[in-house]
Amino acid sequence: MIKLSEMKKVWLLKSESPNQSYEELLLENEFVVKSIPTLEFEYQCKEEIETALNSPDEFGGIVFTSIRGVQSVSDIFVSLSDSVKEQWKSKLVFVVGQATEKSVKENLKLDSIGSEGRKCKATWGGHYTPSGVDFALPIFNELQLDINTVRIIALGPSTNAALHSNKIDVYGVCREPTPKGLLDTLSLESTMFHT
C-alpha cells in the first residue's frame, strides 16, 4: 500500500487569498503544493452596498455565501457610524461555510449562524458552474495537459457538477469545503486507489 505522503503533488486551483490554510495543512502532511490562482476580483455596486448598509432598519438580516462577499462589504462596513454598526449586530447574519463565518467575525465583528449547515436551512435554486473550472479548463487545453492523467478532487458539489458537465472524471468530492475536508478526501482516495 502506498502511504498518503507518497502522493506528493497537489495542485490547488483557487482564488488568491491571504488565508493559506489549505497550503499549510497539506505541507504539514508532506504534500508538495502548487497553488494556481484562478480568479481576479473586481467588486461592483459599491454605492448600492453602501446605501443598503446605511439602512439596516430596512433589512431583517444579511446572507454571506463566500469570503469574497464579506470582502465586498468589509471596506464599506468599517466606515459606517458606530450606531449603524450596532444596528447590524442585532440583525440575523447567515453564512455559508466556516471560512465565511470566520471572515464575518474578523472583518465585520458580527456573529453569524449557518456555518455548519445545521443551524440554518436554505433552499437553493438554479445551477451554476464555478468560475474556477471555467478558468482552468481553457488553460489546461492550451498547455495540452492531459487531465485524464490527473486525479481531480472537487471541494464541493457545485464544483463536482461543473467538472462532470465538462465530461471530466472526478475521483473524489470533499465532505466539507475545508482544508481538513480536502486532506481527508486525499487520504481516502489514496487508500482506495493504492490498496
Image (tube, rainbow, N blue to C red):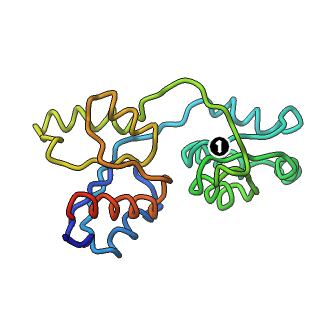
Residue reaching furthest to the left: 144
Answer with the quarter of the image where residue 82 lies: bottom right
Name the foreground residue: 7 vs 83: 7
Residue 114: give x, y in percent of width and height: 69, 50
Q: Residue at x 30, y 58 (%)?
A: 189
Total labels: the figure holds 1
Residue 85: give x, y in percent of width and height: 82, 51
- On screen, residue 23 versus residue 33, left or right, reads right
Q: In which quadrant will I find the N terminus?
A: bottom left
To which residue does mark 1 refer?
64
- On screen, residue 35 versus residue 139, left or right, reads right
Answer with the quarter of the image where residue 17 lies: bottom left
Name the foreground residue: 19 vs 158: 158
Residue 37: give x, y in percent of width and height: 33, 48
Question: Image height check: is 5 above or below 175?
Answer: below
Residue 149: give x, y in percent of width and height: 14, 46
Question: Image height check: is 167 above or below 91?
Answer: above
Q: Residue at x 64, y 48 (%)?
A: 75
Q: Residue at x 84, y 39 (%)?
A: 56
Name the foreground residue: 75 vs 154: 154
- On screen, residue 86 versus residue 78, left or right, reads right
Q: Residue at x 60, y 42 (%)?
A: 65
> Which element is circle 1 on?
strand
Answer with the quarter of the image where residue 104 lies: bottom right
Callout 1: few (<14), some (14-19), or many (20+) C-alpha neighbours within 10 Å?
many
Amino acid of disc 1: Phe
